Structure formats: C-alpha cells, structure tokens
Amino acid sequence: MPTINVTDQIAFRADKLNKVSLFEVPQFFVDVYCLEPGQEQKPHAHADAAKVYYVLEGEGVFLVDGEERKLGAGNAVLSEAGDPHGVRNDSTERLTLLVMMAPNPNH
C-alpha cells in the first residue's frame, strides 16, 4: 500500500510557490503547496476538474469564483470545475496546503 509522511515532504522555495507531488493517478492528484509570505498561486481555472485546498499550517487568502476568504489551519475550500481560483499568502508566516484535484488534468 502506498504511504507517505506528508510532513517530511514540506519544502519551501524562496523564488516561488513550491508544489510537491504526493500521489498522482489518472483519476486525481494530491500535492502539498508551500508558500512563503508574499507568494501566491495566481487565479486560473480548470474547465473539467475540481480542486480542494486544505490548510495544514498558516493562513491564506483564497479566491474562488470571485469570492475571497481568509482561512487558517483545519479549513478547506472547494473550487468546482470552471471556477476561477487561487491563493495568496499575505501573512508573515509560512502557508502549507494539502491540494487535491479530480479528475487529474495531467492525464
């Protein structure tokens, strides 16, 4: 059975948001996104795939379909297929997210 210690995979980059792949199959993928203060994932959309952001640590500002909301650890947000979505870390602390997308747009 494939297993992974998520905490061991967390890695930040000074130059941009770091996406660390945990699992990837044709049906979905699961990543850890690591954002330093000031970093962001610019708003974008996936016509045929939904995305869930789950905050592991820190606090981020999430944009989904024109609505912005600040969320902290333990909160999740859904972006349905076609909804513009993104996240930014406007805090002074690091932000770590568990991100799942289905179906996997890379397959």
Image (cartoon, helix red, strand yellow):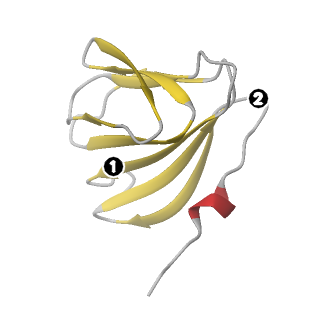
Query: Who's the residue at 43% across and 64% down the image?
Result: 24
* Image disc number at residue 101: 1
Q: How many marks?
A: 2
Indicate whether 69 appears above or below 99: above
Quarter of image, res 103? bottom left
- Of the residues shown, which amino acid type is indicated by label 2? Asp
- Label 1 sits on what residue type? Met
Where residue 36 sits, quadrant-wise, is top right
- Residue at the image point whose x is 32% and y is 59% from the top: 28
Residue 73's place in the image compared with 31, above or below, is above
Neighbourhood count class around disc 2 (C-alpha, 10 Å): few under 14, some 14–19, many 20 upward: few
Tell me if 54 is positioned left or right of 88 in this view.
left
Marks 1 and 2, how far apart at CA: 24 Å
Circle nearer the N terminus (1, 2): 2
Q: Please provide percent x and percent y for residue 45.
A: 32, 28
> Of the numbered discs in the image, which one, if any, rests on residue 89?
none
Q: Which quarter of the image is occupied by the N terminus? A: bottom left
Q: Residue 18: give x, y in percent of width and height.
A: 64, 41
Residue indicated by mark 2:
15
